[in-house]
Image: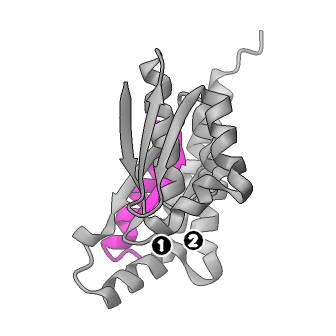
Amino acid sequence: MTQYVKIPKERVGVIIGPKGETKKFIEDKTTCQLDIDSESGKIDVTCEGDPLKEYRILETLKAIGRGFSPEKALDLLEDEMLMLEVIDLSDVATTPKELQRIKGRIIGRNGRTRELAETLINVKISVYGKTVSILGYPEQNTIVRTAIKMLLDGATHGAVYKFLEKKHQELLQSRLDSIDFY
């Protein structure tokens, strides 16, 4: 069965990679065929058999289209619990200037806010075009989505940092609680 995904034209080259290496790597790893139309950004994906694999490759291509490097996006093929979440900022920002301001708040000065969220919650974040995307496990994505919503609602960066620190401690504690020492 053939499915397709459409990505921004300027990201097509990233999926193809130098001398077609990234495309070939994805095809070899998944035994799926990628038919890429570099004019429209449409990618037809044909996989034999496994529909879950087809879904995972579509998510991987979407992640690359949303600004993640192939190395980060390919983690989706390795771990079926890893999820891509895309938040559309065009619902919140009505003008290009407002979109720029919102993206700046999410990234933070010198990338500090994004880096802190990535480090404390152990996710990957990409701010690209009119979207912010998260690669992580469902619980982690929920935390980061909440932090982003806080920023969009006008919370101070300090309040968001405290929220992320608290959630980081909760995640650590839940991991410790799940370890059986006996």
Q: Is residue 41 magenta?
A: no
Instruction: Say which residue appears at 27% left-offset and 71% top-offset.
Output: 90
Q: Within 10 angstroms of label 2, few (less than 14), some, or many (20 or more) residues?
A: many
Which residue bears the numbered disc 1?
A: 106
Instruction: Say which residue appears at 59% left-offset and 62% top-offset.
Output: 13
Q: For the residues labelled 2 and 1, say whether their Cβ atoms are less than 8 Å apart.
A: yes
| Whole-number angstrom distance, CA of label 2 to CA of label 1 | 6 Å
Q: Amino acid at mark 2?
A: Thr
Q: Is 18 drawn above or below residue 90 in the view shown?
A: above
Q: Report the disc number at residue 144.
A: none
Q: Is 53 drawn above or below residue 73 in the view shown?
A: above
Whether residue 62 is visible, yes or no, is yes
Boundaries of the magenta span: 132-156
Mainly helix, strand or loop, the magenta region? helix
Q: Amino acid at mark 1?
A: Ile
**From the viewer's perspective, is 65 left or right of 19?**
left
- Residue at far top of view: 182
Quadrant where the C terminus sits is: top right
Tag 1's secondary structure? helix
Q: Report the disc number at residue 113.
A: 2
Give coordinates of residue 10: x percent, y percent: 50, 69
Quadrant where the N terminus sits is: top left
Q: Is residue 133 magenta?
A: yes
Q: Is 129 drawn above or below residue 64 in the view shown?
A: below
